[in-house]
Amino acid sequence: MTSLTVEGVDVSHSRLVELTNLADQAQAFYEWVEERFQLALSRREPLGQILLTATAGEIKRAMLDCYKPSDSGKLPLLFDGVGRTYKHEKACYYFFSWIIRDAPQQRLGPLIGRILKNSKRKRVEIEVQVIASLICKYRSNVKTFSWEAVREVFVERLEGSRRSLQGHRKEAVVRTALLTAFQGYFTRHGGYGKFTSVKVADRQIAIGKQTFDVSAELSNERGQVIRRILVPVKTRETEGGGHAHLYSRDIAPAIAAIRNDNSDDYLVVIIGAQNWSVREAEEIRSKVDHVAVFEINPSAFSEFGSTEQQRLNNFVAAVLDGVLQPKL
């Protein structure tokens, strides 16, 4: 990110860039909910208008259609402050809670738990009733549920989530970029191409002795994982030369691990380092499926930037379209 300096003092607000980039990826989920509400209630108004005027019963009916959609394979993603995706029912709970109530996990969750103890109904039914009641009760105070207003709420919620999840900064940047690529494709095509669903892992995964900071599973209509995108994130303060060569050798075991484990996996390498060797970078590009190199101090690695984001978008689109096969 380009720094903002006033009279020699860096006043940049990189956290705002990170959080707004992440919040923007929730728009696909918002638009999907809007479409479900319009279909369930046979209305054409925007979601914000529907939430301001629909009855509690109508809101509950449409929310249940979001929780349990008939076409459950083609679902957008929702995530926490470091880009870790929620399972779909949890995503619906957080989405609807965030627009009307803070702290759905710490404060609203225990209240729903108390109701559940006194009821024979399923938790989903209780969640829907509680949130629909909250929307009807307080929508005159909220005044708008437009995407622009909800986006600001999401930035705040994501910031709170990020504060409670320390030590994940570089993974969060890369996970956000990968989510951006998937969500952008979903928005354009209404699905994930030749795949039915996508799941981005919420933590590192291990293959053999190698760990991959960020990963995504691509599944078919039967829920079988048929492709993975595996992403090691390599950051180091280096001046290139021999240091870059030694560091490049660290990537070789990752290549061997996934080629030995499953030749259907894609390997994406993210490098953040100052003055990285061009020759070493090209050597890595020849062996893996996609590479993003950021010539930047690792401590300043806070966003992908438009050029590398577009390159990643193109790579993911080629994977989802089925026109790009993993390198062997």
Image (spheres, rainbow, N blue to C red):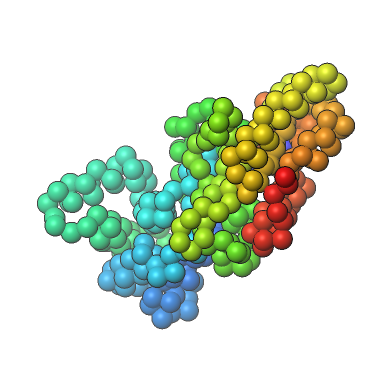
The residue depicted at 12 percent of the width and 51 percent of the height is 118
Q: Which of 266 and 318 is in front in this view?
A: 266
Q: Is 197 situated left or right of 257 in this image?
A: left
Residue found farthest to the top = 242
Residue found farthest to the front = 260
- Report whether residue 222 is seen: yes
Q: Where is the N terminus found, in terms of image quarters?
A: top right
208 w.r.t. 230: above or below? above
Q: Nearer the viewer, residue 328 or 202?
A: 328
- Report whether residue 29 is seen: no
The residue depicted at 47 percent of the width and 79 percent of the height is 44
In the figure, residue 286 lies in which quadrant? top right
Q: Is 283 situated left or right of 143 in this image?
A: right
Relative image position of residue 289 (x, y in whole percent): 72, 45
Q: How many marks?
A: 0
Relative image position of residue 69 (x, y in whole percent): 39, 67
Q: Is 73 situated left or right of 101 in this image?
A: right
In the figure, residue 305 lies in which quadrant? top right
13 w.r.t. 104: above or below? above
Q: Which of 300 and 241 is in front in this view?
A: 241
Residue found farthest to the left = 118
Relative image position of residue 183 (x, y in whole percent): 59, 57
The residue depicted at 67 percent of the width and 56 percent of the height is 319
The residue depicted at 82 percent of the width and 28 percent of the height is 276
Residue found farthest to the bottom = 42
Q: Where is the C terminus found, in terms of image quarters?
A: top right
Relative image position of residue 215 (x, y in whole percent): 57, 42
